Structures are given as structure tokens and as C-alpha cells.
Image: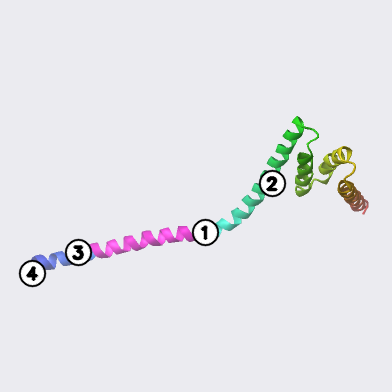
Amino acid sequence: MSDQKSKESPLKRILLVFSMVAFLGSTGYGLFGLYSNALQQPQTTATSEEASVDQQLAAKERGYELVLEREPENRVALEGLVEIRLQMQDTQGAIAPLEKLIELHPQEARYKVQLDQLQQQMNQQNEDSKGEITE
């Protein structure tokens, strides 16, 4: 019986060591993959967030345009379109709906003030770009 026990003991030890190495290896591989993905994730998230914001703004802009196709004098849609285009840095595109708002609601001074500001901004951008070309 002791002969049989001594024969099994080395075999059990080998299997035990092999099992432990396999377990630790697979666990280590899984943890390595987890941490390497976590380190790479923030870089792609920032880019995807910017694209997502641009897509959301474009979708809102299209929504306001669709409303204005049905109701060209819709004040909320015109105001929203101006705001969205300003968020998209489209100053030139914001001027047309703002002019329409002034035409529909001439008593609203804030529209005139905002239009004057946008036109000054456009003039300044044009002067800046002309200055860069001549230099």
C-alpha cells in the first residue's frame, strides 16, 4: 500500500502544480487584457463624445429645419435654429433665421442686438482673414 501511495504522490503533485500554473496563467492573462483595455478606453471615449455631440447638434438642426418647412413662421423653431447654429460655430447660418425673427417680431429688441453682434463678428472675421492673406 505504501508503494501505491508513493507512486500516486508524485503524480498528484505534478497535476497539482500543473493546475495551479494553468489557473494563475489564465487569471493573469484575463487581468492583463482588462487593464490594457481600461488604459486605452479614455482616448477613444473623448473622440467619440465629440462626434456624438456634433451628431446631436446636426440632428437638432435638421429637426428645426423640418418644423420650419411645415411652419415657416414658428418662433420656437427659428430661435432654436439660431441657437443650434451658434453652438455649431455657424455664424453665417444663424443670421438668416435671426433676420426672419426680426421680420416677424420687430418689437423684440434682443433679436436686433443679437443680429448686430453676429454681423460685427462676421465683419471682424472677414477683416482678420483678409489681413492674414495680405501678410
Q: Which is more N-terminal, label 3 or label 2? A: 3
Disc 3 to disc 1, C-alpha distance: 39 Å
Q: Are marks 1 and 2 in contact (CB under 8 Å)?
A: no
Q: Which is more N-terminal, label 1 or label 3? A: 3
Q: Which mark is on residue 12?
A: 3
- The residue sitting at 77% across, 45% down in the picture is 85
For numbered disc 2, what is the local secondary structure?
helix
> Which residue lies under the disc numbered 2?
54
Q: Which residues are magenta?
A: 15-36
Q: Which mark is on residue 97?
A: none
Q: Given the image, on which type of amino acid does mark 2 rest?
A: Asp
Q: Which is more N-terminal, label 4 or label 3? A: 4
For numbered disc 1, what is the local secondary structure?
helix
Dot in front, 1 or 2: 2
Is residue 30 one of those drawn in magenta?
yes
Q: Given the image, on which type of amino acid does mark 4 rest?
A: Ser
> Which residue lies under the disc numbered 1?
38
Q: Position of residue 72 (x, y in %)?
A: 79, 33
Disc 1 to disc 2, C-alpha distance: 25 Å
Mark 3: few/some/many CA within 10 Å (<14, 14-19, 20+): few
Q: Are marks 3 and 1 in contact (CB under 8 Å)?
A: no
59 and 15: which is toward the camera: 59
Q: Which is more N-terminal, label 2 or label 4? A: 4
Q: Which is more N-terminal, label 2 or label 1? A: 1
65 and 19: which is toward the camera: 65
Dot in front, 4 or 2: 2
Colour mapping used in the image: rainbow
Q: Which is more N-terminal, label 1 or label 4? A: 4
